[in-house]
Each structure stands twice: as C-alpha cells, then as structure tokens.
Image (tube, grey):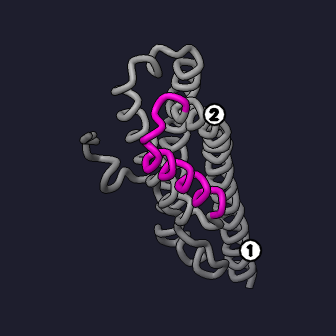
Amino acid sequence: MNFTLIFIILIIAWAVLTYNKLITLRGRVDNSWAQIDVQLKRRFDLIPNLVNTVKGYAQHEKETLAEVTASRTKYLSATTPEDKLSANSELTTALTRLFAVAENYPDLKASGNFMDLQNQLKDTEDKIGYSRQFYNDTAMKYNISIAQLPTSIIASLFSFKTRPYFKTEGEERENIEVKF
C-alpha cells in the first residue's frame, strides 16, 4: 500500500513540475515575442518620418510610399502572431524597395535627416533580427518540450500549442530590382 501511495505522489509531483516547466517556457516565448513587438513599434514610429522625408525628394514614387504605409497599417491592425508575421514580411519588402528607390536620389541620400532616419532604422532592424533569433530559439525549446514524451501528455491535457517561427519568405529572400 505504501508503494502505491508513493508512486501516486511521484506521478503527481512529476505532473506539477512538468506543468510548471511548460508555463515557464511559454512565458519565455511570450516575453521574447513582446521584445520583438517593442522593436517593431520603434520601427513603425520611424516609418512616417522616413516616408515624409522621401516624399519631399521623390514625388513620383507614390506607389512605393503607399506600399510602406499600407504594410505598416496592416501590421498595426494584426491581432495574431501569424498575421503579424505575415504583415512584417510585407513591410520588410516594402522598406527594402523604399531604400532601393532612395538610391536614385543623390540629394535625398545626402540629406542629414534621411541619413539619421536610415541609421536609426538600420539599428532597429539589427535589434529586430537579434530579437527574432532569440524568439525562434525560445519557441524551438518550447515546441520541442511540448512534443517530447512524456511531457506531451501534460501539454495535451492543458492545451499547450506550438508557436510559429519567424521565417524569411518569398520576396524577402530575393534581390530587389528597381526599374524606371
């Protein structure tokens, strides 16, 4: 009888420890996502200034400027991580095109305001890149934990779901070609 009681106590203790481990890992994933969100917010705060600066020099590039603005709006209205990932991809592509367009305007490239905004955006992009790496590493640890036996039993019982990874997709992988 004592052996059965000890076995039950051990199973309950294991279940509690496993649950707490999964909660901790999920919290780390959520925190790392929040860190990306902070950097993306900084990026989005810089974009209107950047677009207005480019507008002054490149009046006929309205399509590119509209694409940047639309992508920013799409991200800000996204509610799920998957939607935000998709909108972020579109924004990254639009910003790449914007900088490619800017290459054709020597006065714009020489503008102190544009250079400052470009440097701030570059620094922010670097921080976003590091945050994405950290998020992906944290999500990987979490996803593996909820898939491995016997932890997967607790994960299934309490509906722990895998988290998506940041990936470079489609146009982000290609070189941008600007034609006039």
Q: Residue at x 67, y 76 (%)?
A: 7
At which x and y percent is residue 52?
60, 35
**Vertical position of residue 74 compared to residue 138: above or below:** below
In which quadrant of the rendered image does the N terminus lie? Answer: bottom right
Using the image, determine if residue 123 lies above or below residue 13.
above
How crowded pointer 1 is (Cα within 10 Å; few <14, some 14-19, many 20+) is rated as few
On screen, 63 above or below 114?
below
Q: Is residue 35 visible?
A: no
Q: Nearer the viewer, residue 29 or 109?
A: 109
Q: Which residue is the site of mark 2?
A: 49
* Residue depicted at x 58% and y 19%: 116
Q: Which residue is mark 1?
A: 9
Q: Nearer the viewer, residue 62 or 160?
A: 62
Residue 90, image x, y percentages = 45, 54
| Residue drawn where x is 36% and y is 26% of the image | 103
Residue farthest to the bottom, as pictured: 1
Do the CB atoms of the residues marked 2 and 1 lie less than 8 Å apart?
no
User: Where is residue 47, by image quadrant?
Assistant: top right
Relative placement, left or right, of 56 versus 38 is left
Q: What segment is highlighted magenta in the picture?
A: 56-77
